[in-house]
Amino acid sequence: MLSRVKTASALTIAAVGATMLVPGGVNDAEAASISIKALQVAISKAGSPYRWGATGPYSFDCSGLTLYSFKQVGKQLPRTAADQYNRTLHIPRSAREPGDLVFFHYGSYVYHVGIYAGDNQIWHAPKTGSVVRRERIWSGNAWYGRIDD
């Protein structure tokens, strides 16, 4: 677990774990929203291999990672990226926050999903031959969705 956390950027850890750094502050479990907790689950899976159709706990496809991450914190999501998009509260890019879902689309077709990490980056399971990782958002064709807490 520690080696996986080392792969997370200082920015991501600061965004999702700052309460642990304040002496006398509350811990993550007490302070973090459901979405931030789901982001922390996704970060803990850094380095897990991509496998089409996989929903964890050892390998994932893109929507399998988001499904798994939110399931671990008590939220049920549909299986596919498109169905997950339809399940979220749609928000503008300017309102996105760490823990929101990022949906990549071509026209009206949603083809990929990740969890927003802040600083224009996501945690996701990209494609065959890759692993769960943090990556910069590469396309302007992205929609954003929020899971209710």
Image (cartoon, helix red, strand yellow):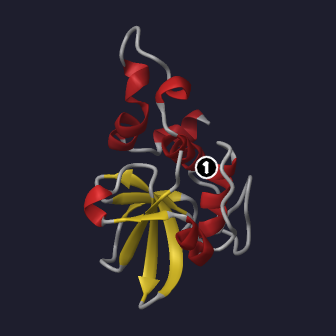
Which residue is located at x 74 percent, y 52 percent?
57
Q: Residue furthest left?
A: 94
Which residue is located at x 57 percent, y 77 percent?
82
Disc 1 marks which residue?
45
Picture mark count: 1
Q: Amino acid at mark 1?
A: Lys
Relative vertical location of residue 4 with respect to residue 97 in this rendering, above or below: above
Which residue is located at x 52 percent, y 51 percent?
148
Please tell me which residue lies in front, 132 or 114. Answer: 114
At which x and y percent is residue 85?
53, 71
Residue 66 in sight here: yes
| SS for dot 1 | loop
Q: Residue furthest bottom?
A: 107
Q: Quarter-wise, where is residue 91 in the image?
A: bottom left
Relative vertical location of residue 42 with respect to residue 10 in this rendering, above or below: below
Please tell me which residue lies in front, 79 or 23. Answer: 79
Residue 128 in sight here: no
- Crowd rating for badge 1 (residues with CA inside 10 Å; few <14, some 14–19, many 20+): many
At which x and y percent is residue 41?
59, 44
Q: Is residue 128 left or right of residue 148?
A: right
Which residue is located at x 43 percent, y 31 percent?
17
